Image: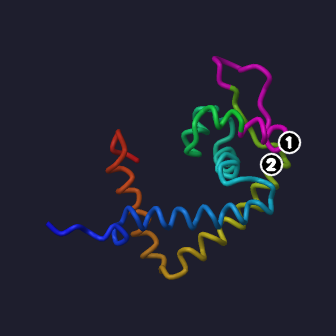
Amino acid sequence: MKREDLGRTVGYQLKRVQAALRAAMDGALRAHGITTPQFACLDLLGRRPGLSNAELARGAFVTRQSMNVLLRNLEDAGLVERPATAPSGRALPTRLTPAGERLLEAATADVLAIERRMTAALDPAQAKVLLDQLESMAGALSADGRG
């Protein structure tokens, strides 16, 4: 049985792209004073205000404990706000402040520029096929089969 060159597998290439994307995003976001996980959190809140810590952690691919620290740092920086007490249950809904909205807008422009650079060799139809295939791969590996 012939062993496959791991450097020519989809999984290896996905990890290689992810590492390069993360490095590019880290560099661009440093100019805004935030990290990639902080950007992910701000982006989630920009699209869905009021998410809980657990929902943000899942969406940003970090643990709940890491999200607690991340949110505290964003709160100290004046980028997000949470009520002192939960309106119902235990979850503290988080929202962007006006400063957070401005920073998110500026940082998003830089992140989208990186995305355009990364996908420059693809035409719109190829980009759509790639997105569909990546969603299918994530779904195939997830516990519930949906990504």
Quick one: 8 or 70, which is closer to the camera? 8
Q: Earlier in the sequence, mark 1 or mark 2?
A: 1
> Disc 1 designates what residue?
78
Image quarter for residue 92? top right
Is residue 136 shown above or below 75? below
> Disc 2 designates what residue?
100
The residue located at (65%, 49%) in the rendering is: 37
Quick one: 124 or 113, which is closer to the camera? 113
Cβ–Cβ below 8 Å for labels 1 and 2?
yes
The x and y percentages for residue 90 are 65, 19
Within-10-Å neighbours for mark 1: few <14, some 14–19, many 20+? some
Q: Which quadrant is the N terminus positioned in?
A: bottom left
Q: CA distance from mark 1 to mark 2?
A: 7 Å
- Residue range highlighted in magenta: 70-91
The x and y percentages for residue 49 are 68, 40
Image quarter for residue 59? top right
Left or right: residue 60 versus residue 68 is left
Within-10-Å neighbours for mark 2: few <14, some 14–19, many 20+? many
**Amino acid type indicated by mark 2:** Gly
Quick one: 8 or 57, which is closer to the camera? 8
Please check the rendered image and state whether residue 90 is part of the magenta-colored stretch, yes or no: yes
Is residue 117 shown above or below 61? below
The residue located at (34%, 48%) in the rendering is: 141
Q: Residue furthest top?
A: 89
Image quarter for residue 14? bottom left
